[in-house]
Amino acid sequence: MTAETAVGVARQFTSRTCQFTGLRVDVAAQNLIKANAVAAVVFLAIGGLMGLLVALTRWPAVHLLPAEWFYLVLTGHGANVLLFWIIFFEMAVLIFASTILLNARMVMPKLAWFAFILMVVGAVLGNVAVLQGESSVMFTSYPPMMAKPHFYLALILFAVGALIVVGQFFANLIVAKEEGAFQGSMPLVTFGALTAAIIAVWTILSGAAILIPTLMWSMGWLSDVDPLVYKVVWWGMGHASQQINVSAHVSLWYLVGALLLGAKPLSEKVSRTAFFLYILFLQLASAHHLLAEPGLSASWKIVNTSYMMYLAVLGSMIHGLTVPGSWEAAQRRNGYDKGMFEWLRKAPWGNPAFSGTFLSLVMFGFIGGISGVVLGTEQLNVLMHNTLYVPGHFHGTVVTGTTLAFMAATYLVLPLIFQREIIWPKLAKIQPYLFGIGAAGISLFMMGAGTLGVARRHWDITFSDAELNFAHSAGAFLMMGLNGVFAVIAALGGIIYVLVVVGTVLWGKKITSGHKLTFPLHAGGAAAASQYGSHATVKLPGTIVLIAIFFVSFVLYYFINWKYLSELWLFR
Amino acid sequence: MSTKETNVNVGGAGAKSEPIPFMQRLLDSPLLLLFLGVAIPTLLYTLWGVMEVVAIPLAK
Ligand code: HEM
Ligand SMILES: [Cu+2]
């Protein structure tokens, strides 16, 4: 139980000491991180390409793919990026946070390799099923639409693999404490990863509870799956998995701030409480996907999406204050103490790990966060339900937020874990900006088109062969065109990312002792990341101004939507 | 300046005479947190939601 009973019991494991951070790196954990990161990038490349094809089809002037292919590729896009890319990367984050960051060992690495193989088999089988063409059920796979059995089986195999790794995260954590790898409370980044792992357990259990019966239905063993029960339980997985992403990328925001700027949390207590709010309440927000369902009561909807979810939103607001606040505090300590914004002007903007993380933070808040609260409000939801506003919103969360944060973190993983120097630093420098601008563009223009009534998952917005004619406004067409243009920009940013990663892993200069990093770390970075402790200060004028701008935008946008609602929905 | 470094590292070892605050003990217990994080949404979201769906009368 306690540390002293375990002192001296610590097991031997093959490790090296990192010359940049002084952390003890378990080689087994390192290899697992490498494998999961590589798999993640492979599926991002496939899925990103599919995203481009989807966007080019929805660009009316291009209208690239025929209808059947559109739905097939859309299904593949969702699965490859939202499941395979993100979850493989998250496995790497969980392993890192429970071993290397704690100077601890990976428990049962062979089991983790088995899990990895299960996940790869699941991801490959999923792609095969989608490409065979009879499983174009899209990301949500709502019955009575039915996919082939191996589509569901693929998702189940992938999820079982992920659940094993999540279990190992808990085991690593408990063993690390018992063997005395760390004393007292775990570091904040690990606590954030713990939050992600907890949400992952519920996510995967929900997924199993609904996908196993759906598989049996697809095999003909069950006569039907109730569509509404499916929706309720499926969204337990579909939404909660997004909250794994949020917890994981918020942890990375803290980690990158620590490693690059030497930032410590302003208050461990406050930041940990914010994660605790996630653990308690974030998953309930799954109900926002069902706000338009007549079969569920207003009390269920409102309890799950308002009262409780706002507590989780509070958690995000806390991180939104304390992450940039801790960066400001650190930069002021680093000597950039002049005026309101010297700390920000003199931040390492040329380091893609920093610029990507910063853009992720800002865009997640402004684009994903604000639109999320609007969509999650029962009354406002009817304005945008099932329009392109929805994908617009979630590209603001999972692309500009999570994906960009993961890309940024990769620029640390390459030199520190793969021990290779970034091969094309100039390209790497512009990559987060390019991808960020593209991703922000597709988010905003899809939101714009959705506000003008364009449906999501719709192949032909001209309704060319429809019985009843309908014409979208010219503005809607413009939005779809701009969406296409920014999709190309995002795809370029994505391609550069993949090239830099592949190039570095294969041909990057091997890092030997005494090497100086192209994108250096902060001298006190590793200690700030791996030890419990706060840097209490309230002198944060710059952050306060940024937060004020955020709140004003939030309130204005929120009320504009209520105004808009009152005009559409006349009470007389 | 209003800046101060704190590097509290209490709990665990049990060597400190002060009792560890309840919240800190809770936040240091991964399995207890896991229980809360699974039980709350299962009750409030899944069970309550599925009960409502099941209570919808079937069309004749
Ligand atoms: C090059 C980057 C990307 C582009 C151009 C892009 C574009 C699009 C477009 C145009 C849609 C279709 C909207 C519709 O017709 O309903 C879509 C759907 C979607 N995208 Fe992306 N996307 C990109 C990256 C990503 C990433 C990185 C993720 C996740 C991390 C993601 C997750 C999704 C999901 C889950 C859907 C919904 C699929 C469905 O409705 O079944 N996208 N994307
Ligand atoms: Cu959601």
Image (cartoon, coloured by chain):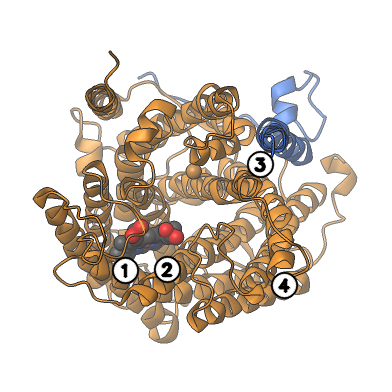
Chain colours: A orange, B blue
State left or right for residue A393 relative to residue A131: left
- The numbered mark, 4 or 1, whose residue comes first in the sequence reads 1
The residue carrying pointer 4 sits among few (fewer than 14), some (14 to 19) or many (20 or more) residues within 10 Å by Cα, namely some
B37 or A124: nearer the viewer? A124
- Pointer 4 residue: A219
Q: Secondary structure at mark 3?
A: loop
- Pointer 3 residue: A186
The residue located at (50%, 24%) in the rendering is: A306
State left or right for residue A558 relative to residue A326: left
A107 or A229: nearer the viewer? A229
- Pointer 2 residue: A77
- Pointer 1 residue: A54
The CA span between labels 4 and 1 is: 30 Å
Q: Secondary structure at mark 2?
A: helix
Indicate which label's residue lies in the foreground, 4 or 2.
4
The residue carrying pointer 1 sits among few (fewer than 14), some (14 to 19) or many (20 or more) residues within 10 Å by Cα, namely many
The residue carrying pointer 2 sits among few (fewer than 14), some (14 to 19) or many (20 or more) residues within 10 Å by Cα, namely many
* Residue A275 % position (x, y): 57, 35
Q: Amino acid at mark 1?
A: Val
A282 or A145: nearer the viewer? A145
* Residue A489 % position (x, y): 21, 66
